[in-house]
Image (cartoon, grey):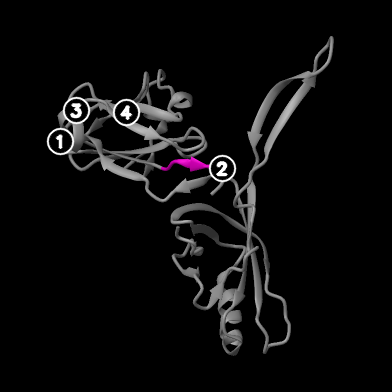
Amino acid sequence: MDTKVCIRFVRSDEREFLIDGTDWKIPSKGLDGFGSYENDITTVDNAVGDGGIIVSDRIAPKDRTVTAISRNPYLNDILRKSAISFFNPKFDYKMYITYMGITRWVEGKIYKFSIPAQNVNRVMEMSITLLSPNPFFKSYDNFGKNIASVVGMCGLLLDNDGDVDTYCKAVISANGDVVNPKIIINDNYVRVLDNMKANDVIIIDFTQNPPTVKKNGVNFIGHCDRTSAFDDMQLPVGSSEISFDADTGSNLMNVSIYYNKLYGAI
């Protein structure tokens, strides 16, 4: 069994900070909130008799705390300055955790940061709390395959063995004239009313809330067919069939699909 625990923070300006046992290490109780989640459940009492009815449930935004200690007190001055410079509440962060041989990640903002002033010759302790609006861990792999090169217009099965439903991003590029491209997941679809030319790119991102549609980097959601089922384009737990089509030119489409499986805990 792989017992190494490693945390890698990636800031929105691409700077990185590593806690891997070299300069900083994680003590035995240094992870808080990584193996648990809370389900907010709302109920109403039955009008007659005992008990009640569940009317809603949701997983709220989640904060997770990493505590690390310095390995070499002689480097405390350098390590302290580096940490204070890196962890800044004005940036966004991705936090990758490798635990028992599996790597998953979340993203969010620094909610709390602490590196107390103390005896400079002793081991230094640092605490970082990341608040994630999306509470779920994401799989390290995001699939990232051009399904046109795999199966043409035929459906491809995607396997979601995560804990909950997830969503994908579809990148459609044209090698020639493509009229009204469409992405289909199970029995639902989103169709974009457009005459694509060679090198045009349409990105339909169901991972955003609300979903976005862009053509060559410009907002294009107003060009979607009114019958498009944005609310039903999730990838449920289990297998889903995903495919594409167009009124004409479907053989000139490249369609790359990106999705992460979601997990409540590591």
Residue in the picture at 40% in, 18% down: 227
Q: Residue type at mark 2: give it.
A: Gly
What kind of element bears circle 3? helix
Q: CA distance from mark 1 to mark 3?
A: 10 Å
What kind of element bears circle 2? loop
Q: Earlier in the sequence, mark 1 or mark 4?
A: 1
252 left or right, relative to 173? left
Q: CA distance from mark 1 to mark 2?
A: 43 Å
Q: Earlier in the sequence, mark 2 or mark 3?
A: 3
What kind of element bears circle 4? strand
Residue in the picture at 17% in, 39% down: 198
Q: Which residue is mark 1?
A: 176
Depicted 256 relative to depicted 11: above or below: above
- Compare residues 163 and 257 and report the one nearer the observer: 163
Depicted 76 relative to depicted 44: above or below: below
Q: Residue type at mark 4: give it.
A: Ile
Q: Which residue is mark 3?
A: 250
Which dot, 4 or 2, sits closer to the camera? 2
- Compare residues 34 and 224 and report the one nearer the observer: 34
Label 2 neighbourhood size at 10 Å, few (<14), some (14-19), many (20+)? Answer: some
Specify the label residue 264 is tagged with. Answer: 2
Residue 138 at least partly seen: yes
Start-end of magenta stretch: 260-264
The reply to whether the C-beta atoms of the residues labelled 3 and 4 are less than 8 Å apart is no
Q: CA distance from mark 4 to mark 2?
A: 25 Å
- Compare residues 204 and 193 and report the one nearer the observer: 204
Which dot, 3 or 4, sits closer to the camera? 4
The reply to whether the C-beta atoms of the residues labelled 2 and 3 are less than 8 Å apart is no
Which dot, 1 or 2, sits closer to the camera? 2
Q: Residue type at mark 3: give it.
A: Ser
Counting from the top left corner in percent of width and height, residue 183 is at: 32, 28
Which dot, 1 or 4, sits closer to the camera? 4
